[in-house]
């Protein structure tokens, strides 16, 4: 599984004097392509991208050391991604899988994304087979465990999550050269999880914090989402969306880019209903692709969302004013899940 399994490219290593051209190795490995893709896909997240580049540099140097015959140990690559929903953790995990594969640190560039339900059984003897089956599926690549803290439920002595944790810890230690595990979730809950399960903390080499998006970054993400679907905001609609972002951030269950994606989906629904109800005859492309101010302001976020005027109606309502929350979604260049 060493770097020799991935083409080093001509000129990366000079056999005559044992020197390695890091820049040539970087270009030949395909790492540049992955990092540039990450820049294109995700708005902002400067500290996250910086850490990914630092890890990439470390792995490139480690690979160069192996190529010139220097002693080395396989680096520990297990990671922790902490941050609020919709901040790009799943997208970055996918790109990390690609990067580790290109650099020769995993056999396959696949990412297997799971939650507690995929690992923990409902009765005695059920958990071990479930966990081992997932590990078998992920072996050679990256296992991404979202909301990993749900594996551990200290309040329930009969919970089977501890059995899954013990299996994971053993594999993370004994097969760390053939599997990278990324644990993800809210920062405070992950801290508690690591405190209760110190074996995980000791096996995690890289802790990466994902900041919330700034308002202007969320507007940029919204534009990208709409452009990809051949939609646009009118000037008044963009002003309304800026107000929406500021209001939505202050209300419960804000999920960064995921909340923006949900809001735009609802706005498109309102636009379609508005156009149909208007029955104004043939519509041109501009009319079919423009979201107006009313399509944004119809959201109950403007009337208080979950914290204000709509409170009495929220007992059976989804947590998000625009849509029910979900777990980390597959990579969406705009949503930054």
Image (cartoon, rainbow, N blue to C red):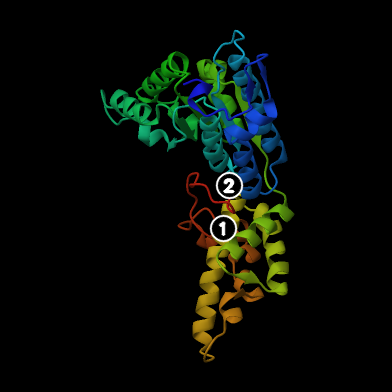
Q: Which residue is the site of mark 2?
A: 86
Asked whether the viewer can see residue 321, the reply is no
Q: Which mark is residue 261?
A: 1
Q: Residues within 10 Å of mark 2 (few under 14, many from 20)?
A: many
Q: Residues within 10 Å of mark 1 (few under 14, many from 20)?
A: many
Does residue 252 lie above or below 231 as drawn?
A: above
**Residue at 63% across, 75% down:** 294
Asked whether the viewer can see residue 2, the reply is yes
Image coordinates of residue 57 in percent, x first then y, are 67, 26
Foreground of the two, 76 or 113: 76
**Residue at 57% across, 64% down:** 264
Could you tell me which secondary element the residue under label 2 belongs to?
loop
Image coordinates of residue 133 in percent, x first then y, are 31, 28
Labelled pair 1, 2 in contact (Cβ < 8 Å): yes
**Residue at 50% across, 58% down:** 323
35 left or right of 134 in image: right
Does residue 312 lie above or below 251 as drawn?
A: below
Image coordinates of residue 96 in percent, x first then y, are 56, 34
Q: How many angstroms separate mark 1 from mark 2 (CA)?
A: 10 Å
């Amino acid at each position: 599984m060493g770097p020799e399994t991935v083409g080093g490219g001509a000129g990366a290593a000079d056999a005559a004097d044992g020197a390695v051209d890091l820049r040539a190795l970087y270009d030949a490995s395909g790492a540049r392509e992955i990092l540039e893709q990450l820049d294109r896909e995700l708005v902002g997240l400067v500290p996250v991208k910086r850490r990914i580049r630092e890890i990439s540099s470390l792995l490139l140097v480690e690979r160069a050391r192996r190529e010139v015959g220097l002693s080395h140990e396989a680096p520990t690559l297990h990671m922790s991604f902490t941050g609020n929903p919709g901040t790009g953790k799943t997208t970055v995990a996918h790109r990390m899988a690609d990067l580790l594969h290109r650099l020769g640190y995993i056999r396959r560039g696949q990412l297997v994304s799971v939650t507690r339900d995929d690992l923990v059984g409902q009765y005695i003897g059920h958990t071990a087979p479930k966990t081992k089956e997932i590990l078998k599926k992920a072996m050679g690549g990256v296992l991404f465990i979202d909301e990993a803290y749900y594996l551990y439920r200290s309040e329930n002595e009969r919970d089977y999550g501890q059995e899954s944790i013990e299996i994971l810890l053993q594999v993370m230690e004994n097969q760390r050269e053939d599997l990278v595990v990324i644990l993800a979730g809210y920062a405070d809950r992950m801290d508690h999880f690591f405190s209760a399960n110190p074996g995980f903390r000791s096996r995690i080499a890289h802790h990466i914090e994902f900041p919330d998006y700034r308002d202007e970054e969320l507007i940029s993400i919204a534009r990208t989402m709409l452009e990809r679907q051949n939609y646009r905001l009118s000037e008044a609609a963009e002003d309304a969306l800026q107000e929406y972002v500021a209001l939505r951030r202050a209300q419960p269950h804000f999920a960064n880019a995921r909340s923006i994606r949900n809001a735009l989906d609802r706005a498109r629904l309102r636009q379609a209903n508005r156009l149909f109800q208007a029955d104004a005859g043939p519509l041109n492309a501009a009319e079919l692709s423009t979201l107006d101010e009313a399509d944004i302001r119809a959201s109950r976020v403007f009337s208080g969302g979950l914290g204000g005027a709509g409170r009495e109606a929220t007992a059976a309502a989804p947590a998000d004013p625009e849509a029910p929350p979900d777990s980390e979604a597959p990579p969406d260049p705009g949503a930054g899940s």
